């Protein structure tokens, strides 16, 4: 029960952080946007987002997708943060960064979707994959 309470609190807190991130995005304050994403990634996943972005596809699979202690919720948080950063790259026409990060986002959302139990369905992961595959 304590673990469930912790996870609920963590997701609620992440929701508040996402609201701040989206506010910076709406205001087009990209420096604060990127800083908040970097801080959130470190806080909720213990990974630096800039390090994740620079990983090769093989390193990403080994270090993130097959990480022994990252929870499904942490992977979902990471996916959301990477997806928001991907949108920023698209808005700024950073094509090389966009292409590299898009591959990671697809891999991460696919991993999330493929590791759900039979009784689970993640609508967010499903729709993000549909958007990314277009």
Image (cartoon, helix red, strand yellow):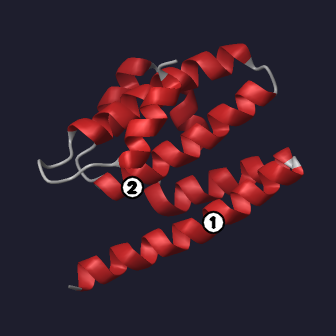
The relative height of residue 24 versus residue 131 in the rendered view (above or below) is below
Q: CA distance from mark 2 to mark 1?
A: 14 Å
Residue at the image point whose x is 61% and y is 38% from the top: 50
Instruction: Please report contact status of discs 2 and 1: CB closer than 8 Å, yes or no.
Output: no
Q: Position of residue 75 (x, y in %)?
A: 38, 48
Whether residue 92 sits left or right of residue 85 in the image: it is right
Q: Position of residue 94 (x, y in %)?
A: 75, 20
Quadrant location, the N terminus:
bottom left
* Closer to us: 52 or 112: 112
Res 113 quadrant in image = top left
Residue designated by label 1: 17
Residue at the image point whose x is 74% and y is 52% from the top: 35
Res 98 quadrant in image = top right
Residue at the image point whose x is 55% and y is 36% from the top: 51
Residue at the image point whose x is 57% and y is 47% from the top: 81
Q: Is residue 55 visible to us here? A: no
Mark 2, other Cα within 10 Å: few <14 / some 14–19 / many ≥20: some
The relative height of residue 2 versus residue 65 in the rendered view (above or below) is below
The relative height of residue 29 versus residue 17 in the rendered view (above or below) is above
Sequence-first disc among 2 and 1: 1
Whether residue 78 sits left or right of residue 89 in the image: it is left
Whether residue 12 sits left or right of residue 84 in the image: it is left
Element carrying mark 1:
helix
Element carrying mark 2:
helix
Q: Position of residue 118 (x, y in %)?
A: 11, 47
* Closer to us: 54 or 111: 111
Residue designated by label 2: 74
């Amino acid at each position: 029960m304590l673990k469930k309470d912790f996870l609920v609190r963590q997701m609620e807190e992440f929701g508040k952080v996402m609201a701040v991130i989206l506010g910076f995005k709406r205001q087009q304050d990209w420096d604060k946007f990127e800083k908040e994403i970097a801080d959130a990634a470190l806080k909720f996943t213990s990974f630096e987002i800039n390090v994740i972005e620079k990983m090769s596809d093989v390193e990403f699979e080994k270090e993130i997708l097959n990480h022994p202690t990252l929870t499904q919720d942490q992977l979902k948080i990471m996916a959301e943060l990477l997806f928001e950063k991907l949108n920023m790259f698209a808005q700024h026409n950073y094509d090389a960064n966009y292409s590299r990060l898009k591959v990671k986002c697809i891999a991460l959302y696919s991993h999330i979707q493929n590791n759900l139990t039979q009784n689970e369905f993640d609508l967010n992961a499903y729709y993000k994959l549909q958007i990314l595959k277009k």
